[in-house]
Amino acid sequence: MEHTDAAPPDQATERPMKRQASHSSATRDGVRPDLKRAAAADDQGYKTHGNMYSDGKNKKSRQRDRRRADNASKIRSGDRHKAEQVVTAADMTNPCSTKTGWSGMDYKRRPEAKQLTQDWLDRKIYKIMVDDYEFTLVRYERSPTLLLDRNGVAFAFRSNIPDWMTTPDENGRTWLDHFEEECMWYIDKCGPRKDADIEANNRGDHWYMVVGVDRQNKKSPDLTSFHKAHRQATDELLQKPCTARLIKFVSTTFETRFPSLAQRVSDCETKLREQDRGEHATPLFGKFYNYCINGPRKGVVDGVSTGPHVDGKNLALMMCAVFVWGKFDHTEKAWLVLWEAKLIIELPPGVLMYYPSSLFTHFNVDPSDLKIVTTSDGSRPTPENSSPLKGVPGRGSVVFFNQATMFQLAEKGSSVKDARARVISPVA
DNA sequence: ACCCGAATGATAGAACGTCT
DNA sequence: AGACGTTCTATCATTCGGGT
């Protein structure tokens, strides 16, 4: 219930810090919240970027921490990386969540689902959105973008592309090139997915996987079966420099832009530890429990382009983060639609997009479809010239997300089922 | 002809959300 | 509170493809 509050995501989850700063040094007034958070994170044993270096406690590491904190506060105040703000049709006071508020409303229950999927398959949807529904196009203009709902509530964020991703090294190759290689290495190492697994993915027919911890229909959190089946490859992937750097970047950006949502993840870990569930309490991907690579399938799907869907199992008032990699014409291909917000968002490789994926029907769409559909000779899109099954060649993505069941367990202390049983039978 | 492991298929079960 | 549908996991039997 408490999560269905008609409040901005950043406030809806705001709750008193469980742990009062117990050390006298931390009780001073005027301590920046970000520093307090860092201290709390340290107390909880997180492997934050900060304490990796501050273990040594030398002067340099302190300077590094301070610079990082200064940078974060400047970003927050708008002195650096100021975000352009876009007001949209979204309404966060009335989000498409389930009644309990934990997760998102299933795609199949959404009124337009059937027609939408059909129009997407027919490649008519772009024209419909632009011409009939007056969707807003959000082009990439090299600055960060903050998306506000109709009430001014921030509900999504698109980063700019940081220089370190695109600066060529001595061989003329960039971080983005190397990251792509790491993803392709992993896809190759794990091998092709079974047809049944591809079939089961309602997002598209590209290669995908989910690693990390979940509790879907399990009593206790555990690694996903894919993670267990490809443990070594996954361990190796997480050691790779570009993947490791992205995980840090995604998490620190999340903490900077959505501090109280990041805090809710930290609280989740703390509570799971208090419940003696320490084994899988720590998110393996910074502030995210799950990580997913979407990529091509050799000879079958050339690149990733997802059809209309909702990630309903994810925590409703939480962000998932999509990172786009690969090489394709991002001005014409694979823009991201947030249906209920009436947005079509350009996502070049290197940007990071945060949004609540359980609340918004989302999918990729090609602005170039406009040309196909409006050809004067009356030619129709055909499977030959426009099969969505082939996807967008050269495009891949990586998704960070948090599933509702982990937070149910942490915040209620048990599964929803057990919690109900306890409330209803106080007699015994 | 025989054996073994991998892939595939069938079935049961758990958890959650929804409806009555 | 109970029935039902959906989604995902676990388990076991069967089939398939090599290899000896």
Image (cartoon, coloured by chain):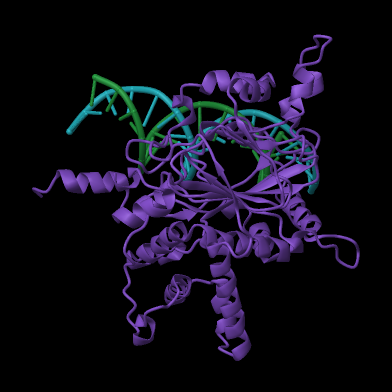
Chain colours: A purple, B green, C cyan
- Left-right relation of A297 to A98: right
Can residue A205 be seen from the camera position used here?
yes
| Residue positioned most to the left | A427
Quarter of the N terminus of chain A within the rendering: top left
Is A32 in front, or is A271? Answer: A32
- Left-right relation of A323 to A215: right
| Residue positioned most to the front | A79
Q: Residue at image x 51%, y 32%?
A: A340
Q: Which quadrant of the figure has residue B12?
A: top left
Q: Position of residue A117 (x, y in %)?
A: 59, 23
From this view, report whether residue A221 is shown above or below residue A119.
Answer: below
- Left-right relation of B16 to A402: left
Q: Position of residue A247 (x, y in %)?
A: 62, 61
| Residue positioned most to the top | A378
Can residue A285 be seen from the camera position used here?
no
Q: Position of residue A215 (x, y in %)?
A: 43, 50
Is A304 in front, or is A200? Answer: A304
Q: Residue at image x 67%, y 25%?
A: A126
Q: Which quadrant of the figure has residue A181?
A: bottom right
Q: Position of residue A176 (x, y in %)?
A: 77, 56
Counting the numbered discs, the total is 0
Q: Residue at image x 54%, y 69%?
A: A73
- Left-right relation of A291 to A280: right
Q: Residue at image x 45%, y 32%?
A: A106
Is A118 in front, or is B3? Answer: A118
| Residue positioned most to the right | A171
